[in-house]
Amino acid sequence: MFTKKNLTLAATVAALGLSNSAFAEKFEFSSSSTKAGAVVVFQAGDQASPDLSRLDKQSQSQISNALKAADFSGKSKQMVEILAPVGMDAKRLIVVGLGDDAKLNAGDVNLVGADISAKLKSSKVENVQVFTQGISDSVSNANFAAELAHGINLRAYKYDKYLSKKRPAEKNYHVVVSQPAKAESRYESLEAIEQGVFLARDLTTEVPTEMTPVDFAKAAKELKKLGVKVKILKPKQIKKMGMGALYAVGKGSSEGSRLVVAHWKGSDDAPIALVGKGITFDSGGYNVKTGSSIANMKSDMAGAAAVLGTVKAMALQKAPVNVVAVMGMAANMVSENSVAPGDIVMTAEGKSVEILNTDAEGRLVLSDSLWYARKNFEPKVMVDVATLTGSKIRAVGNRYIGLFSNDEELVTQLTASGDIVGEKLWRLPLAYGDMLKSPVADLRNIGKGGPGATTAAMFLKEFTGDTRWAHLDIAGNALTASDKGVTQAGGTGHGVRLLSHWILNTQVK
Ligand code: BES
Ligand code: ZN
Ligand code: ZN
């Protein structure tokens, strides 16, 4: 059964009509079993066989023969599906290997859930029963059950707005667990995080002409229904406040730039500021992008989507935290009004910037956004999230987020959260600041070859004052072309789970 609290979250999302992301598989955690079309059981590496004690002798021997024939030994990532198992009501039995379950962290369990969801995707089965008793991750049996549900749901999400073949109907999962109330309360927080991830995915996957700075601002305003304070600055105000860099990037597009602020004040602590790059389409500007990479540039607002998704995740669960997201939004387009290479703009920080390459626009919108966050909120710590550089992809690829920081404790905390949720970080150096020297302005907006992700980060550092700060370069992480892990093809929502885990589980001083 759903607890009252769970109903509240599901009902809140549905009643408020909070966009496409209201989709969710249905989970109930229970200590007793039920009937279902599909049954999932696990075998940890130290078990000789899955727990089939509820079945009669004949079924047990059929199943163990099938497992033998498939060379199943309970190793991690092994999965065997047995159709029409003898002596069971279910149409299919799925046996999943876990390896050493005591070593599984949350992200590992999410991936197991994702594999189960992928396996069941094409089947018409509506009800699934999952037996988790006796299985614990590195935390507990209840945690295993909740993280499993989280992984199943993360993988089941699909952005199907433009597909005539819609995603399959939601399935009902009956999860048998020894402490159902504990599993349920743990899942409640994860469910809110899922909704944050789904929002980030919706925004990232939406096509560029339907997700402009104004559209994004509209999506942010929806969070007002959850008690989030939302403020939008238009180009005129942006210019008047001196944010010349943010202003410049948007001036080649008809809508111009927006600064979007979304504040969840669930405590009186000094705020944590999350700053997001929100380029709704990056054509490169006059340094126009050539080649196929331009087709992915609708996702250049994934940093803004991730920080907004995190705020939604905190608001939905009424988390006792003070988090503000500041998002610098613009479409980087080519027109007679666009900024031209060689132009010099003035940032609100008071540093002038020579724009030598209009394709290095992310750092420009972030410079004024970082300033705004510091000036208006005096945060105890700032984390920016941005699809900032191709150089980051060349350095660490798309299985890591590039991490830059001026604070060792922050590095340790964020890296630990990333390992736990499976959004891993790799630290890169803050150096080569001399490469940003310009003879005509305080800074140039590009480095000089070589360490492009680092010089981009060094540029941002100029706008962080003495605030503790980390920069997450998520270029390559934001969009996936194929179904993989906890994500189907499309926007990944990368950053939401990482930031949510960090904010909820770490003492951020
Ligand atoms: N949005 C891109 C970075 C990017 C590249 C994100 C590939 C995701 C996938 C960014 O604005 C950009 O174009 N950066 C340039 C900077 C260069 C001109 C100094 C780059 O990395 O090539
Ligand atoms: Zn660019
Ligand atoms: Zn960009």
Image: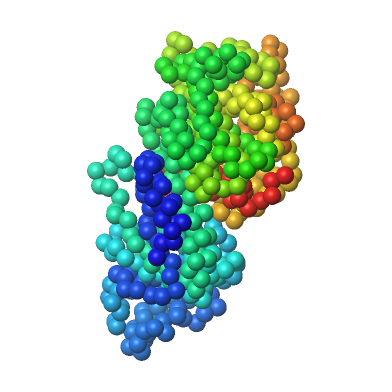
Q: Of all residues shown, which one is farthest toward the left? A: 164
| Left or right relative to 166: residue 354 | right
Query: Eyeballing the image, is 462 above or below 499?
Result: above
Would you identify the image quadrant in which residue 72 lies? bottom left
For the point 56% across and 39% down, the residue is: 264
For the point 40% across and 46% down, the residue is: 13
For the point 45% across and 80% down, the residue is: 51
Q: Of all residues shown, which one is farthest toward the front? A: 4
Query: Eyeballing the image, is 192 above or below 386?
Result: below
| Left or right relative to 17: residue 260 | right
Would you identify the image quadrant in which residue 490 lies? top left
Colour approach in the figure: rainbow
For the point 66% across and 51% down, the residue is: 506
Residue 278 locus on image (x, y percent) = 51, 30
Residue 291 in view here: no
Query: Eyeballing the image, is 15 above or below 71?
Result: above
Question: Which quarter of the figure is the C terminus placed in?
Answer: top right
Query: Eyeballing the image, is 459 above or below 4?
Result: above
Residue 507 locus on image (x, y percent) = 69, 49
Residue 85 locus on image (x, y percent) = 30, 78
Residue 112 in view here: yes
The image shows a total of numbered marks equal to: 0
Would you identify the image quadrant in which residue 448 lies? top right
Residue 234 locus on image (x, y percent) = 49, 19
Question: Which quarter of the figure is the N terminus placed in?
Answer: bottom left
